Amino acid sequence: MKKVVTIVVILIIVSLFGGSLYYLYQKNQESLLVFQTEQSTVETIIRKTVATGTLKPREEVEVKPNISGIVDVLLVKPGDMVQVGDLVAQLKVVPNITSLNSAKNQLRQTRINLENENKLFNRQKELFEKGVISANDFDLAKNAMDNAKQNVAAAEENYEIIQTGTTQDAGNAATTEIKARISGMVLNVPIKVGNQVIEANNFNEGTTIATIAKVDDMIFEGKVDESEVGKIKENLPLEITVGAIENTTFDAILDYIAPQGVEENGAVQFEIEGSLKETKGIFIRAGLSANASIILEKAEDVMAIKEALIQFDRETKAPFVEVEVGNQEFERRDIELGLSDGINVHVKSGIVKDDKIKIWNRVERPISKSSRR
């Protein structure tokens, strides 16, 4: 009886041992790697390049005086809105004493000459009426008196100009009233009351009293590298982002690309300009730093997959993906690619929307030391 029990126990142990070996063998035959899948999505893919620059008003005018003097009254400050013809500043002319005294003496002399010529004219007139002198002599006397009157008028104007800086006959040619030349916002007033200003002429650009600009018409001024300038052209759309204005993008159009580059820090840069379509009711301060995304190509609402899902044939370099046709069973599908933004790529043909695409280059998590223990 004991032998039977022993034999049964041994058989049970052998059976369990054999079953364990068979189970381990079957588990070893199964694939240890299970591939996950992803499906295509509908995306708007944009290929673009970025230029850095600033936002500036398209029209910006520096107001300069046409006479020299001292600022007596300043009527504007930065941020004020002005219209064409509004008074910006009032100047006071401080005459040169030497020039003023010389002009005064000249005026006295011309008045003395006029008085003398007037006496001579009256004598010649009496003689002409009595028939003693000819008409020619009378005309000469009248002409001399008229010239004397003109000299007095010129001397009076010269004296007035030196004393006040202008005359009534000069009109707007020279005036102490400095007015706005365009409508817009005052951006800068670099002078103060009491400062001396110099007139703008052929030899001097003059002193800037104020800078006025149309802030509702802004442009983007930036630069692109020579490696990117060949990819862009005029009339391309721009997306402007401003660091000081969060979560807002402004649409613009590329208007200008400089025909000649400028070398900066060893690289050739080309200037570009773009016009903002609208400011969306947001006040944009002149001189704000901005980035312009120049849209080179755009594909809206297209079927796209991640570039990481794409494989390439070793011989032909043709793109393909592996599509799941059964449980962990995949087949190769050649695909035609379109526009890519570096993350997603447009698939023109080769797959359909519901296809499950194999993630062939899955990154496995490293086994931690605690797991190994």
Image: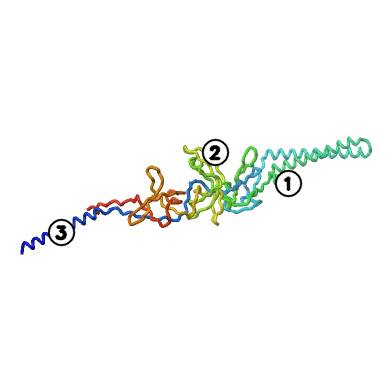
Q: Residues within 10 Å of mark 2 (few under 14, many from 20)?
A: few
**Does dot 2 land on a helix, a strand or a loop?**
loop
Residue 186 - label:
none
Q: Is residue 215 above or below residue 260?
A: below
Badge nearest the viewer, 1 or 2: 2
Q: CA distance from mark 3 to mark 2?
A: 88 Å
Query: Where does label 3 land, which residue?
Result: 15
Which residue type does callout 1 highlight?
Gln
**Does dot 3 land on a helix, a strand or a loop?**
helix
Query: Where does label 2 land, which residue?
Result: 260
Question: Quick one: 99 or 339, which is closer to the camera?
Answer: 339
Query: Where does label 1 land, which residue?
Result: 168
Instruction: Give the x, y percent position of residue 357.
Output: 38, 54
Q: CA distance from mark 1 to mark 2?
A: 50 Å
Answer with left or right where residue 130 lies relative to residue 80: right
Give the position of the N terminus as an image quadrant. Answer: bottom left
Q: Residue at x 53, y 42 (%)?
A: 271
